Amino acid sequence: MSGAKRGPNQRGPQVLFYAVPARIRLKELVCRLVGACGLHELPAQRRHCTYLDTFDRAILQTDGVLIYLESEQDKHLLWRGQGRLQASLPIESQPRMADDLPPSRVGRELAKRMGIRALLPLLQTRQSLRRFVKLDDEDKTLLRLDLIDESVDHKRPHRYLAVESMIGYPKALKDLRDGLARCGCRPLPRDPSHDLFTDADVATQPAPPWNDYQLLPGERADVAARLILGKLRQEMQRNLDGTLKDLDSEFLHDFRVSVRRTRSLLGQIKGVFPQRRLQRFSEAFAWLGSITGPTRDLDVYLLTLPDYQARLPSQQGEALGALRDYLVQHQKSEQRALAKLLGGARYKKLMDDWGVFLAEPPPLRSHLPNAALPVVEVAGRRIWKLFRRVIREGRAISAQSPPEDLHELRKSCKKLRYLLEFFKGLYPEADIKLLVAELKQLQDNLGDYQDLAVQQASFEGFRGGMEKEAMLTERVDAALVHLVELLAEREAEVRKEFDEHFRRFEAKPVRRLFASLFKPSKADSPEDAQQVE
């Protein structure tokens, strides 16, 4: 693949693959290679192979292949890519999360690529393997040659040769390559696993991002809105199975973000869809947001618990292991309840009805004020209005303002961010990237401030819950009290940083760029012309 990242072990054994010509008998091929290259045959093996990758294909996207191999002799995790064997690690069982990987440099490199995503089985195969080795005078292995028959679901096997050449023995490799060429074995252009993936119809590329669409400035606003909402619906459905099965926390995260974006767009596109019909869907997506919240909150606390532990003295950090047990127990309970709701009739009917609504052709003539207007006009006007609101709310905040004011500003910023992302294709890419970056730095400050307040309340709630369940020892209680104190201190620091972040966002270059892109040709009111000056 082009643009592949470097593997952790570019000096690992070189791996080459060859096709076995159909015209040559297997016995003849083996005899010729063994005789010409001085190979020794080892006992044959039968292996069960599980090809693994994350949902977003983090391994395949870096030109790698990850295989969990099981045989009567052992279990291994094999990672190859960029023409080399990156690793062959003994392992006790099939890994799922990064924590399941062997503690090694290679394990850490794999974990970095996986992030917080789970390794999912893409394909299961069976291998019959005959291994030949080339040894030196001291019985040191110079290279290996594997003759492999690999099949999926007992179908006709793929037969190929895999050559693994140790570093520093070019002559042994050259002799073998010459021998393979004389036998008519041609080099394969890629890892044979890709042919297995193709035959089994396994997707090797990640799904396109939800915002992989193109809007035309003159397109009707209702048509554009249906397109965007349809993409978000697809994203929800794509993440549904992983959310139901709790494969990893990112499925629910991406599901919830799609719900939030849907709710935001429905709330921002006034006069595009009939309000009476929209009301029902708005309420239904609010329900989706509410039922997914508790599980996601617990996911986040479990993901960030190591960071909390690192803030505390070592003994107090260790004491929070009991909090992990508490969170895991409640996450499982909330996850079961969520899976029941998302697997039920109400969610299915919502998605079916929503799909029908989005597939409806727009009326040739609409009585709604914005439905037939060009999307660039409707989007620009709404973005400009939200930007003015953000400036107005931000300028009204002082050192004495209550936290609720910053929370309202945070919500306005999020709505503005979503609109910029929905309609970014209508405007110069570099300009939108700059505006999103400036908005994001303000959002990060506001989000941290809000999160720190929520975290303090949550940890107080966890203390009460653990006490009721007889899980709150003195050590755990002291650790939680100390953690809440640290969070309160950080909250005060973040609050003091707000002015700097807001001043950066409302700087004249940013205001002028917003105005040049989104300000209507005629101001809605006299205040419009002055609001951002």
Image (cartoon, rainbow, N blue to C red):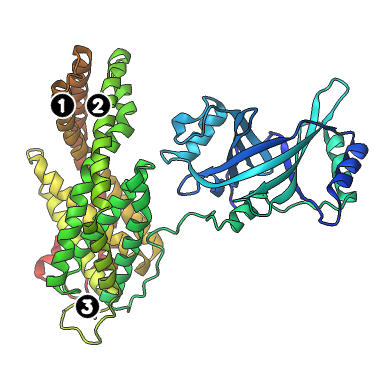
Q: Position of residue 357 (x, y in %)?
A: 25, 72
- Label 3: state its secondary structure: loop
Q: Position of residue 509 (x, y in %)?
A: 29, 56
Is residue 508 at all visible to an observer of this figure?
no
Is residue 284 at all visible to an observer of this figure?
yes
> Which residue appears at 54% of the width and 49% of the height?
61
Q: Quadrant of residue 512?
A: bottom left
Q: Are marks 2 and 1 in contact (CB under 8 Å)?
A: yes
Residue 436 got which mark? none
> Which residue appears at 35% of the width and 60% of the height?
432
Compute the Cα span from label 2 to label 3: 50 Å
Dot 1 corresponds to which residue?
A: 465
Dot 3 corresponds to which residue?
A: 371
Compute the Cα span from label 2 to label 1: 9 Å
Q: Is residue 397 above or below residue 526?
A: above
| 92 displayed left or right of 32 | left
Q: Position of residue 86 (x, y in %)?
A: 63, 36
Task: Please report whichever mark, 2 or 3, sits nearer to the chain's N-terminal start.
Answer: 2
* Residue type at the position of mark 3: Ala
